[in-house]
Amino acid sequence: MNQLNAKFIISAEKLSQCPDFTLPEFPLLGRSNVGKSSFINALANNKKLAKTSNTPGKTRLINFFNFSDMFMIADLPGYGYAKVSKEAQAKWQKYLEEYLLKRKQIKSLIQFIDARHDIQKNDFQMREWVEAYNLPIFTVATKIDYIPRGKQLQVISKIKKQFGGEVLPFSAIDKQYCENILEYLGNLCKNGQ
């Protein structure tokens, strides 16, 4: 499981433009700059696969990545960054909701939380929306390497307490976390849940 050949497939603005694949799909939800692109690059072991940026709000489309024909990762625009018009935001929201609710390939959503900070209001809003529709979801706590080793478990249990469900720690620097996540995704793909 440790060496996956990942490639970028297509960017889509809405459901009708999404690729016609039957692979299990994992959409990434998270605030801008929470580390979704770094997550894709670390799992793929390819620093240049997903564009990382210090400018929040760079991802405007749903970007699809195929991991060795085992599963797809769909990188969604980050929420909580509003340097676009209200109309543009409303349009994104409509398209994203349609994608998340109607895309049959979705196996589980993955919500990203920056381990260095408390869960933000828009993270809770996103989670409430997901739970209102009873969609499968688990959490990835990014940038865990910034937290002292002795406090990492504490941070993870706090997120678990607030969100429930599975919480997996992640660091784009420390590859050991990639192994755990790839294994977890592999199990989800196998279990047909």
Image: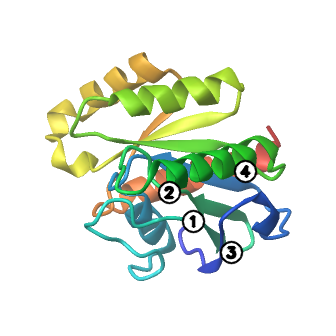
Please indicate whether residue 44 sits to the left or right of residue 97 in the image. left
Quadrant in the picture for the N terminus: bottom right
Return the mark for residue 77: 2
Please indicate whether residue 40 sits to the left or right of residue 68 in the image. left
Task: Say whether marks 3 and 1 touch (CB < 8 Å).
Answer: no
Q: Quadrant of residue 33?
A: bottom left
Q: How far apart are the alpha carbons under marks 4 and 3?
A: 23 Å
Disc 2 marks a residue whose amino acid type is Pro
Please indicate whether residue 68 sits to the left or right of residue 129 in the image. right
Residue picked out by circle 1: 61
Q: Residues within 10 Å of mark 3 (few under 14, many from 20)?
A: some
Residue 70 vs 165, above or below: the answer is below
* Residue appearing at x 34%, y 51% in the figure: 34
Q: Secondary structure at mark 4?
A: helix
Q: Secondary structure at mark 2?
A: loop
Q: Residues within 10 Å of mark 2 (few under 14, many from 20)?
A: many
Residue extending farthest top? 161
Residue picked out by circle 3: 68
Mark whose residue sits in front, 4 or 3: 4
User: Quick one: label 1 or label 4, which is nearer the N terminus?
Assistant: 1
Residue 148 vs 1, above or below: the answer is above
Q: How far apart are the alpha carbons under marks 1 and 4?
A: 12 Å
Q: Residues within 10 Å of mark 4 (few under 14, many from 20)?
A: some
Q: Secondary structure at mark 1?
A: loop
Q: How far apart are the alpha carbons under marks 4 and 2?
A: 12 Å
How many numbered badges does the structure rendering display?
4
Q: Visible in this render: residue 101?
A: yes
Task: Say whether marks 2 and 1 touch (CB < 8 Å).
Answer: yes
Residue picked out by circle 4: 99
Disc 4 marks a residue whose amino acid type is Tyr
User: Quick one: label 4 or label 2, which is nearer the N terminus?
Assistant: 2
Mark whose residue sits in front, 3 or 1: 1
